[in-house]
Amino acid sequence: MDLKENFRPFVVCAALVVWFSLALQFHVSLQLLNNDYPATLKVFLSYFTVITNIIVAICFTSLSFVKRAESGSLFTQASTLTAITIYIVVVGLIYNIMLRGLASPVGWARLADELLHVVNPLIFLFFWIFFVKKSTLQYRQAITWLAYPILYVVFIVVRGYLINKYPYPFIDVVQLGYPKAILNAVVILFIFWLLSLLFILIGKKTVKV
């Protein structure tokens, strides 16, 4: 198992925070869509932020039940945990660099926004730094970790083609056209790859230290 001792109290608390943020965001979205549950669910699950936070929540919840003697869980492997770290860190980076300021949520919506885009990424990054053993990380894994963001891009493009709506402005084909939207997607995937290499390097340097 690629986890250090005494990780369970942290992941239990983290799981509660992440699930709360998701429930709060769903409630906010539900109110905006006049309590239309099917419509809210469709919109809710179209966001990379939401899907990634769900993965984080499932990961923390799964780890809450892991015992030290267990080693077969997917979420106890350094590769899986590092990939999730990269995904949720990108959520924070993209939002705070490119999207912050495009909307001005208030009240509970603001709290949900900050939890999903700032607090949760920092929580998982902290978990990766202090609780994940990184000795098994390999540079070739960076390509494998691109599978999830690539699948998401394909999903969004196909979904957008069918309903003519896109969750993020930088991949909005209606406003940008396919060449620009696809170029933006490629740039973001390249950022994923570079960040993956950086995390692997940091992991290897940490092991040597």
Image (spheres, helix red, strand yellow):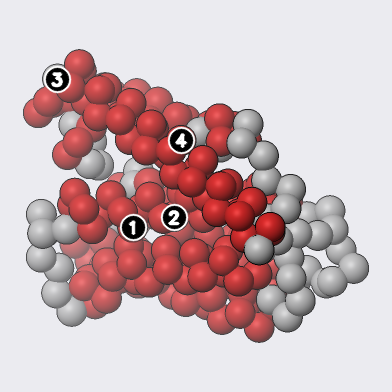
**How far apart are the alpha carbons under marks 3 and 4?**
25 Å
Q: Is residue 130 above or below residue 170?
A: below
Residue 12 placement (x, y as % from top left) = 62, 78
Q: Mark 3 or 1, which is nearer the eye?
A: 1
Residue tagged by mark 2?
Answer: 88
**The one of 169 and 30 positioned closer to us in this rendering:** 169
Q: Is residue 10 above or below residue 113?
A: below
Sequence-wise first label, 3 or 2: 2
Residues 60 and 85: in front is: 85
Q: Amino acid at mark 1?
A: Gly
Q: Which residue is mark 1?
A: 92
Discs 1, 2 touching: Cβ within 8 Å: yes
User: Splitting the image into 4 quarters, where does residue 29 fall?
Assistant: bottom left
The amino acid marked with disc number 2 is: Ile
Element type at mark 1: helix
Read off the residue under disc 4. Answer: 193
Residues at marks 4 and 1, CA–CA distance in whole angstroms: 16 Å
